[in-house]
Image: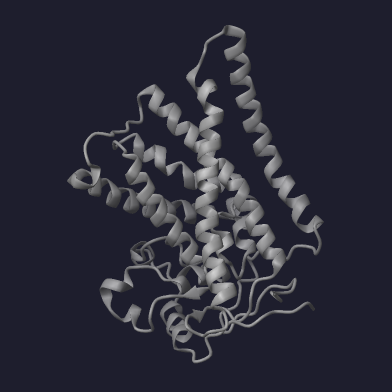
């Protein structure tokens, strides 16, 4: 299948990527991905490995028989594989559906004119696989918190029949939405954008594979919300599963490159509070706007929606030619 070239995609609207804050285009070839990736990843992963090695060495020398040493590697492996499956099912499934099977049908409105390049996709997948390791490390921290008695899980009864269960699901989603908005704005400060968040914004035309394409610091910031909530509210494993499915679905939707909501969606106030695919896609082009994840109320309250957001949404969903086209090598 002919998919794409090595250049950034064009957009069909007059809204262009912001040149002042957009990341520079990477060099062609494997070096353009591998060298920056290793420079970004290795220092952080080396530090994590050193800390884990030190804990294991102390446990062996003093014969402490720490549970975190005994079970930590297995928990890391299980969480990583679980997250990998989740990533492949959501990102891979939507990519297959929209970019391979449905892309020329015109059934759904593509947001930008052209496909991202294979180089962009390789970068998105590579950084996402590294982010999954950070998520797995946070899973080990959750287990450590449970051992320490500061994070509590409950397993009794049928959770879906309990009002508190659904309260905890809604609370988790709302707290995470607030956490994402404010940490996202923090990541857009000058220093953190240049050193951390720029990795994610190398995708001007994101695909579903970009859902977890983060710098290790950003991956940790986004994953740590679970144990933070666990400090204040008892958790049920099924609640975590529901939240993760919703989070992954919305994250992939925001990077899908297609708009799934109908043309009139933003004209009615109950729906206007929910984010669309256009909303986050515009953020990748116009980096100083549209910071929200699930809902739009933080952007509305603090006036960080792009001034042309609604017009762009209606332009995309009203376009007669909705079939995606290819890019080609320069």
> Where is residue 23 shown, x and y percent of the image?
67, 63
Q: Position of residue 303 (x, y in %)?
A: 39, 68
Q: Residue at point 62% right, 65% down?
A: 203
User: Looking at this view, is 40 or 20 the one in front?
Assistant: 40
Instruction: Point out the image quarter for the N terminus.
Output: bottom right
* Residue 279 location (% of width, % of height): 45, 71
Looking at the picture, how far across and down is residue 197, in whole percent?
A: 59, 54
73 displayed left or right of 297: right
User: Which of 68 and 308 lies nearest the eye of the viewer?
Assistant: 68
Residue at x-position 56% and y-position 29%: 73
* Residue 202 shown left or right of residue 322 in the figure: right
Residue sitting at x 55%, y 64% = 208
Q: Residue furthest bottom?
A: 320
Image coloring type:
one colour
Above or below, 45 against 293 in this view is: above
Q: How many marks?
A: 0
């Amino acid at each position: 299948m002919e998919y794409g070239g090595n250049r950034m995609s064009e957009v069909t609207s007059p809204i262009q990527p912001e040149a002042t804050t957009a990341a520079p285009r990477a060099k062609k070839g494997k070096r353009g991905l591998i060298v920056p990736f290793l420079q970004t990843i290795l220092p952080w992963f080396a530090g994590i490995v050193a800390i884990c090695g030190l804990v294991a060495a102390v446990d062996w020398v003093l014969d402490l028989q720490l549970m975190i040493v005994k079970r930590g590697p297995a928990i890391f492996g299980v969480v990583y594989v679980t997250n990998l499956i989740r990533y492949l099912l959501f990102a891979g499934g939507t990519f297959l559906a929209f970019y391979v099977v449905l892309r020329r049908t015109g059934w759904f409105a593509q947001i930008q004119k052209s496909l991202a390049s294979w180089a962009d996709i390789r970068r998105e997948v590579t950084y996402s696989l590294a982010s999954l390791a950070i998520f797995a490390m946070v899973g080990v921290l959750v287990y450590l918190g449970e051992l320490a008695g500061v994070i509590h899980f409950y397993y009794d009864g049928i959770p879906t029949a309990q009002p508190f269960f659904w309260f905890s699901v809604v609370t988790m989603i709302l707290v995470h939405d607030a956490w994402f908005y404010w940490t996202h704005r923090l990541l857009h400060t000058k220093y953190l954008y240049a050193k951390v968040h720029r990795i994610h914004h190398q995708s001007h035309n994101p695909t579903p594979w970009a859902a977890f394409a983060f710098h290790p610091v950003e991956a940790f910031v986004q994953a740590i919300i679970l144990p933070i909530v666990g400090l204040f509210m008892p958790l049920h494993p099924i609640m975590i599963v529901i939240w993760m499915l919703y989070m992954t679905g919305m994250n992939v939707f925001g990077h899908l490159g297609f708009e799934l909501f109908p043309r009139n969606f933003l004209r009615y106030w109950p729906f206007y509070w929910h984010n669309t695919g256009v909303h986050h896609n515009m953020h990748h082009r116009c980096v100083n706007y549209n910071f929200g994840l699930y809902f739009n109320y933080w952007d509305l309250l603090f006036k960080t929606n792009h001034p042309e957001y609604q017009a762009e949404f209606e332009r995309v969903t009203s376009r007669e030619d909705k079939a995606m086209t290819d890019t080609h090598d320069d």
